[in-house]
Image (cartoon, rainbow, N blue to C red):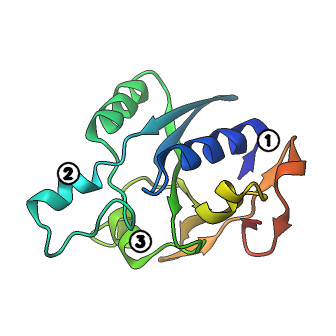
Amino acid sequence: MTLSGAELARIRQHVAAVFPHEACGLILARADARRFLEARNVQDLVRAFNPEEEPPATEAYTVDPTTLLEAGALGLRGWRVAAIYHSHTNGRLELSERDRAAALRDGAPLYPGTIYLVAALGAALSGDKLRIAAWVWQAGAFRPEPLTVTDGAENVDTAEGGALA
């Protein structure tokens, strides 16, 4: 996946703004255009109904359903979900078991071909370079997806395995 420096800056800004909660959002694409849908993380609302089993928004995310409805409406006009992003407050770039389970239904991806971006939060707030990794469902598993930056690369360093650190 290719991201611009401006797109990475937007993700970084969103991640920092909602700390200590996990950030989440969608990147939609149509032809050569992209559209960001910054979502509200409603995980604490989900947790209120099942506090024994649901983690807090500092450890998990649930995209606000109104954002998903907006994405669906835009889908009728040719937009597709190109990427789903969220942050991890523990600094890990891997998809958690919960992330993987939420992305699948009956062993198949809910959004085929969509890239899942995981941003490491600690670096974003400390003023250091944003760390972010990309994952895609291929051959029955989530696998690292290479990331490139078209401009503004001074804010990120490229690392192996689909990660920018």
Residue at numbered disc 2: 45
Q: Nearer the viewer, residue 46 or 125?
A: 125
Could you say where residue 3 lies in the image, as x and y percent from the top left? 74, 45
Which of the labelled discs sits on residue 100, or is there none?
3
Quadrant of the frame with the C terminus:
bottom right
Cα–Cα span, label 3 and label 2 = 21 Å
Given the image, on which type of amino acid does mark 1 rest? Gly
Say if 49 sits above or below 139 in the image: above
| Residue depicted at 17% across the width and 75% down the height | 53
Front label number (2 vs 1): 2
Q: Are marks 3 and 1 in contact (CB under 8 Å)?
A: no
Residue 113 visible to an observer of this rendering: yes
Quarter residue 77 falls in: top left
Binning the other alpha carbons within 10 Å of mark 1 as few (below 14), some (14 to 19) or many (20 upward) gives some
Could you say where residue 55 lies in the image, as x and y percent from the top left? 27, 69
Say if 44 sits above or below 14 in the image: below
